[in-house]
Amino acid sequence: MSDRSLDIAYIALGSNLGDRAAYLSRARSALASLPQSRIVAESSVEETAPIGLLDQGPFLNQMVALETALSPSELLDQLQNIERQEGRERTVRWGPRTLDLDIVRFDRQTVNEPALRVPHPEIHNRDFWQRELAELGVTT
């Protein structure tokens, strides 16, 4: 893995079902195990109110900085695999979930494809993402 191919991806972790802290912990372990990747920083974990569908429990959220040589689409595939392994079912938009992993931004890349937009289109509407990114030293 050459330095030229590395970038930092900022991944939002969220959970509002079951043992939320355990889901976040397993997600961090899975992210750290991704090929050509390593976690270089983590924000604090915070509890937040749901967005969209409000009739559900609060979320635990966290942001991690992942140094990776994976392309944005490869990373998205890996994140969705991790979500599935943790029992994520995509039935209701913004509904309750065991684990939600979002690519919020990259340091050096942008993406505008039907299945993936980076920076995330909701980045400026999520105050907790702003706080977590700021904790990691990132301005948006």
Image (cartoon, rainbow, N blue to C red):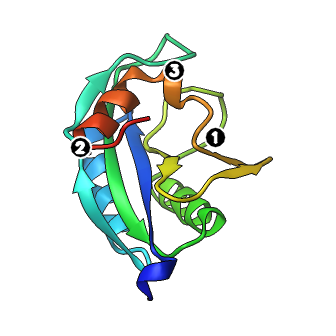
Drawn side of residue 38 relative to residue 76, left or right: left
| Alpha-carbon span between mark 2 and mark 1 | 26 Å
Q: Amino acid at mark 3?
A: Asn
Residue 118 vs 107, above or below: the answer is: above
Q: Residue furthest right?
A: 114
Specify which label sits upstream in the sequence, 3 or 2: 2
Task: Confirm whether residue 84 shows in the render.
Answer: yes
Q: Which residue is mark 1?
A: 90
Drawn side of residue 45 relative to residue 54, left or right: left
Determine whether the residue tagged by mark 1 lies in a helix, strand or loop: loop
The quarter holding residue 67 reads bottom left
Mark 2 near mark 1, Cβ–Cβ under 8 Å? no
Q: Residues within 10 Å of mark 2 (few under 14, many from 20)?
A: some
Which of the two residues, 19 or 26, is positioned nearer the viewer here? 26
Which of the two residues, 33 or 42, is positioned nearer the viewer here? 42
Residue 26 vs 88, above or below: the answer is: below
Q: Which residue is mark 3?
A: 125
Residue for point 80% across, 47% down: 114
Q: Residue furthest bottom?
A: 1
